[in-house]
């Protein structure tokens, strides 16, 4: 499958998942702006937006879609899939559009992004510092989610729900996820170098 076609499919999956999820929530008394604000509180949504924009760019041959940016996108959307599988799966009984959106955002986009990176992204370009920079986005999201949650008295995920589990457990949970992210980043850089060496003439 050509790279641009797979990129277009990934972008379509992400845009569709976000759109279907928005429609499912908007089919109620809340205003569209309120629904949008609610959605933007979730790492799943902001990261799938990143996926949608980056892979729309890849499909359109945009220059900003570099191996570094694609690595960052892969690591963060993989975090979405792993955290969902380990910590969130089964907590809600979803039907209809919500179920479709859930599959697209938590399973399809992470899986296809991994396939794209393995098959099409140029290897051997990532540095050891890359994971540190990639970690800025989830770190900023965490600060945003905690500050927003303190004002709204509503937190997006149970493992950072300060009101229910307290600050100590929230920080422990966040540190464990950060450690997993850092280790995954190191593995990705190692794999990039290994595959880059294998593909050099």
Image (spheres, rainbow, N blue to C red):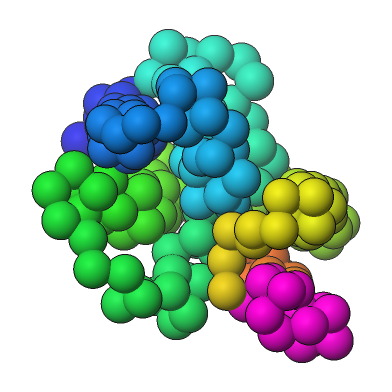
Q: Position of residue 142 (x, y in %)?
A: 76, 58
- Is 23 left or right of 75, judged from the image as shown? left
Residue 111 in sight from this viewpoint: no
Q: Quadrant of residue 73?
A: top right
Residue 159 in sight from this viewpoint: yes
Q: Name the foreground residue: 124 vs 146.
A: 146
Query: Which residue is situated farthest in the left direction here?
Result: 96
In the rendered structure, which segment of residues is drawn in magenta?
A: 159-173
Q: Position of residue 70 (x, y in %)?
A: 58, 40
Q: Name the foreground residue: 6 vs 90.
A: 90
Q: Is residue 55 magenta?
A: no
What number of labels is visible?
Answer: 0
**Residue at x-position 21% and y-position 54%:** 99
- Is 113 left or right of 201, judged from the image as shown? left
Q: Position of residue 58 (x, y in %)?
A: 46, 23
Residue 181 in the image: above or below residue 44: below
Query: Which residue is situated farthest in the front direction here?
Result: 29
Q: Position of residue 65 (x, y in %)?
A: 59, 26
């Amino acid at each position: 499958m050509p790279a641009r076609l797979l990129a277009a499919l990934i972008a379509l999956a992400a845009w569709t998942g976000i759109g279907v999820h928005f429609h499912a929530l908007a089919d109620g008394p809340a205003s569209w702006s309120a629904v949008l604000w609610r959605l933007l509180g979730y790492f799943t949504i902001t990261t799938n937006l990143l996926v949608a924009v980056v892979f729309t760019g890849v499909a359109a041959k945009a220059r900003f879609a570099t191996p570094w940016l694609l690595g960052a996108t892969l690591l963060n959307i993989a975090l979405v899939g792993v955290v969902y599988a380990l910590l969130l799966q089964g907590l809600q009984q979803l039907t209809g559009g919500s179920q479709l959106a859930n599959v697209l955002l938590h399973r399809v986009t992470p899986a296809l992004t991994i396939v794209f990176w393995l098959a099409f992204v140029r290897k051997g370009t990532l540095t050891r510092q890359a994971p540190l920079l990639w970690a800025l986005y989830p770190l900023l999201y965490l600060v945003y989610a905690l500050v927003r949650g303190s004002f709204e008295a509503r937190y997006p995920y149970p493992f950072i729900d300060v009101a229910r589990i307290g600050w100590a457990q929230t920080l422990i949970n966040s540190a464990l996820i950060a450690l997993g992210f850092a280790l995954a980043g190191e593995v990705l850089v190692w794999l990039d170098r290994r595959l880059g060496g294998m593909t050099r003439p």
